[in-house]
Structure formats: C-alpha cells, structure tokens
Image (cartoon, helix red, strand yellow):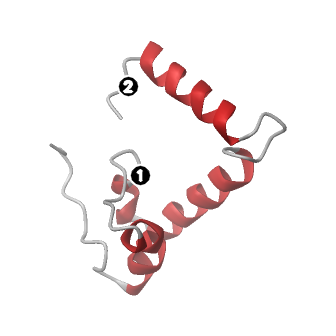
C-alpha cells in the first residue's frame, strides 16, 4: 500500500506518455517509479538513464543484470 498519493497514469499528457510502456502491457507503474509521476520530466529522465545503463546496456547481458539487481534487492531487504 503506497503512502504517497500518485497521480493517475493518464492525469496529464506528460504522465500519459511517461507511463505508456506499462499501460501497453496492462501493468501498473512499479512502486519504485510511481512517486516520480509527480514530476514527469524527472520520470522520463530517470527512465532514459536506466535504459542507457542497465538491462542490456553492458556486456553482462540483461539476464545477468537482472539477477544482480534481484540479489542486491534481497540483500538490502527491498520490498520491490
């Protein structure tokens, strides 16, 4: 249950564009990303940076990067 009230995925045109990848797949915006919907420009920047440096952006490959991210989250007791 989120503690922060988020704008709807289609509250503004900017938020609608930024959340389009999740809406296309019928999924909610991940909880770690959703708070940034208050600042759509920031959300887009973070997503672009994430795409550039993770999940396929290195020579490790997406599968290995996701395994590292999962292990790191587990060690840090992250709930997402």
**Side (left or right) of 77 relative to 5:** right
**Side (left or right) of 41 relative to 4:** right
Q: Position of residue 33 (x, y in %)?
A: 41, 52
Q: Which mark is residue 33?
A: 1
SS at mark 2 in the image: loop
Residue drawn at point x = 40 percent, y = 67 percent: 25
Quadrant where the N terminus is found in the figure = top left
User: Residue 28's image quarter?
Assistant: bottom left
Residue drawn at point x = 24 percent, y = 61 percent: 6
CA–CA distance in space, label 1 to label 2? 14 Å
Which residue occupies the foreground of this view, 14 or 58?
58
Q: Position of residue 34 (x, y in %)?
A: 35, 55
Q: Earlier in the sequence, mark 1 or mark 2?
A: 1
**Side (left or right) of 10 relative to 19:** left
User: Residue 51's image quarter?
Assistant: bottom right
Mark 1, Cα crowd under 10 Å, few <14 / some 14-19 / many 20+, is few
SS at mark 1 in the image: loop
Q: Is residue 50 above or below residue 37?
A: above
Q: Which mark is residue 49?
A: none
Residue drawn at point x = 80 percent, y = 41 percent: 58
Q: Is residue 11 above or below residue 60?
A: below
The residue that label 2 is drawn on is 78
Q: Residue furthest bottom?
A: 13
Q: Position of residue 11 (x, y in %)?
A: 28, 79
Mark 2, Cα crowd under 10 Å, few <14 / some 14-19 / many 20+, is few
Q: Position of residue 16 (x, y in %)?
A: 39, 79
Quadrant where the C terminus is found in the figure = top left
Residue drawn at point x = 60 percent, y = 62 percent: 45
Q: Is residue 68 above or below residue 8?
A: above
Which residue occupies the foreground of this view, 31 or 55?
55
């Amino acid at each position: 249950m989120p503690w922060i009230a988020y704008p709807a995925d289609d509250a503004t045109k900017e938020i609608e564009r930024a959340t389009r990848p999740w809406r296309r797949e019928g999924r909610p915006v991940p909880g770690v990303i959703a708070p940034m919907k208050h600042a759509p420009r920031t959300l887009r920047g973070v997503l672009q940076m994430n795409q550039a440096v993770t999940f396929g952006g290195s020579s490790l490959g997406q599968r290995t990067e996701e395994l590292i991210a999962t292990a790191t989250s587990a060690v840090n007791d992250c709930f997402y």
